[in-house]
Amino acid sequence: MSVCAVLLVLAVLPSAESSFRFASYYGDHMVLQKAPSKAVIWGYGEVGATVTVSLYKDLDTVTKKSVFINEPEAVWRVVLDPIDHGGPYQLVATQHYEGEITYIMLTDILFGDVWLCGGQSNMEMTVAQIFNASKEFKKAVHYPNVRLFTAALETSPTELEDLAKVDLQWSLPTPENLGNGNFTYFSAVCWLFGRHLHRRLKYPIGLVESVWGGTPVEAWSSKRALSKCGLKPTECTMDKFYYAGPCTFSVLWNAMIHPLLNMTIKGAIWYQGEQNTVTDTNLYNCTFPAMIEDWRQSFHEGSSGQTDQHFPFGFVQLSTNQKSKELDNFPIIRWHQTADYGFAPNPKMVNTFMAVAMDLGDERSPYGCIHPRDKQTVAYRLYLGARAIAYGDKISFRGPFPEKMDVDYSASYINITYDQEILVTPSNQSLFEVLCKNTVNEDGEDSVYWAPAALMSTLPRVVTVSFKQCVQISGIRYAWIDWPCEYKDCPIYSSNGRLPAPLFIKYIQQD
């Protein structure tokens, strides 16, 4: 006799009017976080009732937990014992109330790693919108243990305890769920990232998407996080050219993140920042790290300590937008995405990893240049970071970054030593610039400006650039433009050619 049949003898199903139910993001086919963490299960019921949550596999009880529902919330909540990866399991919640026993049941439950995917429209893009979509659709059915969930687009002026609506309840990956002609959709970056992880780890991966295009980081941040950067609750102001989604402070945190806090997760990936090129740009070096730390603390507390307080957080350093204007909004945001260190992880952003995307510009993208279609490379670079930071693999996961600079003023050159061996393509424009300071008139007034610095020579870890046109220099920077290079054709990469060197800016003090 099946578990379901046994339960039917002992219990009755909840009626349509019953308040006994799981929270919105529990469903058949879901993935719960595996050991050593413990999964949190919660829902709603009758005040005064006792709820017992049982996990079954092959008719055997794996774990069982009971809880009494107190006033006033009428919420029940249990923390399961740690369960190793695998499945499928059946999850049964039974309510004992005034002599009546009612049960609810979920089937095909797997245990693995749960990753949250957040951000704006580049994270929102579906598989149907990226390069080689038809091939990607065909691959999807071969990964039934990568499961998908999408929160609906909702806002709220106050923090919600549960999602107001779900767009895609826990599902197996199908072409329809990945954006092929269906009203449901799923993030291409999130899916491809999860697929890479599953192939490497050989166990289930749960992917939770909570994204909204055209939204600034302030909308995804709690009031507590924003206050750390001197921001108070307010309506945001921005250039309407970018506007696509809600921007009022905290409204997406309230409706699309806060309801998920009870969920035990492994980590998060994030693709956002375009909107902040026109919204509080100069505060992003505070607001973004503050949001990460606040999410970490909030998920840790919401899951009764089961989500790591320093869970791994990956993000995409922005790609490109336009070639025609001499604007530096994008390089400023790219720099601020790293809390002005230029690389991740760093002292202000521990346990983070970054996928550089400035070499993935897509001038012919039908969705606008700000939405490049090569999400496969983005996801792969994120995956490398996750392997290193989240899973401890000893692999290369970030592009070259300068560790030392030696300036020779007599010969007017700078030797830039990188932290790893590099692959240099001197045929490209150099992308290096120096901050020149030249005396321009008899009154001794100075002209200070950024001037191109020619790439003169290279060694396995060193590039030499010239600043002969400058009397003095006080800074050097690299790739400090919106669209620095053509597709996968920047001047400097890791020695294997896979990981581009990120932009940097460094000010130099003369002796």
Image (spheres, rainbow, N blue to C red):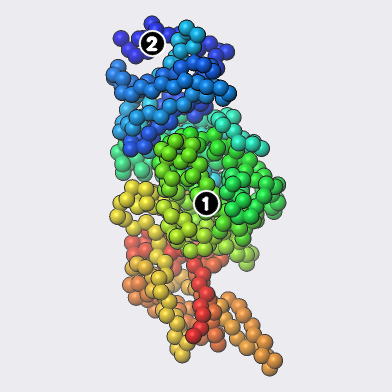
- Location of residue 8 in the rendering, given as x and y in whole percent from the top left corner: 40, 8
The residue wearing badge 2 is 7
Q: Distance from label 2 to label 1 (Cα)? A: 52 Å
Q: Residue 108: percent from the left, percent from the top?
A: 37, 24
Along the horizontal axis of the image, is 172 left or right of 241? left
Of the residues under marks 2 and 1, which one precedes in the sequence?
2
* Residue 496: numbered disc: none
Residue sitting at 38 percent across and 23 percent down?
A: 65
Mark 2 neighbour density, 10 Å: few (under 14) some (14–19) many (20 or more):
some
| Residue 314 in sight from this viewpoint | yes
Q: Is residue 372 above or below residue 332?
A: above
| Drawn side of residue 57 relative to residue 503, left or right | left
Q: Is residue 488 above or below residue 84?
A: below
Give the structural element (helix, strand or loop) at label 2.
Answer: helix
Image position of 390 with respect to 425: above or below: above
Above or below 74: residue 273: below
Quadrant location, the N terminus: top left
Q: Nearer the viewer, residue 129 or 47?
A: 47
Under mark 1, the amino acid is Pro
Instruction: Report x, y in % for residue 422.
Output: 36, 68
Q: Are marks 2 and 1 in contact (CB under 8 Å)?
A: no
Quarter residue 423 falls in: bottom left
Query: Label 2 sits on what residue type?
Result: Leu
Residue closest to the eye, 378 or 66: 66
Name the residue rendered at 55%, 63% in the picture.
331
Count of number-bearing discs: 2
Secondary structure of the residue carrying tag 1 is loop
The residue that appears at 35% across and 35% down in the rendered structure is: 34
Report the residue marked by disc 1. 372
Determine the residue positioned at 52% across, 60% down.
339
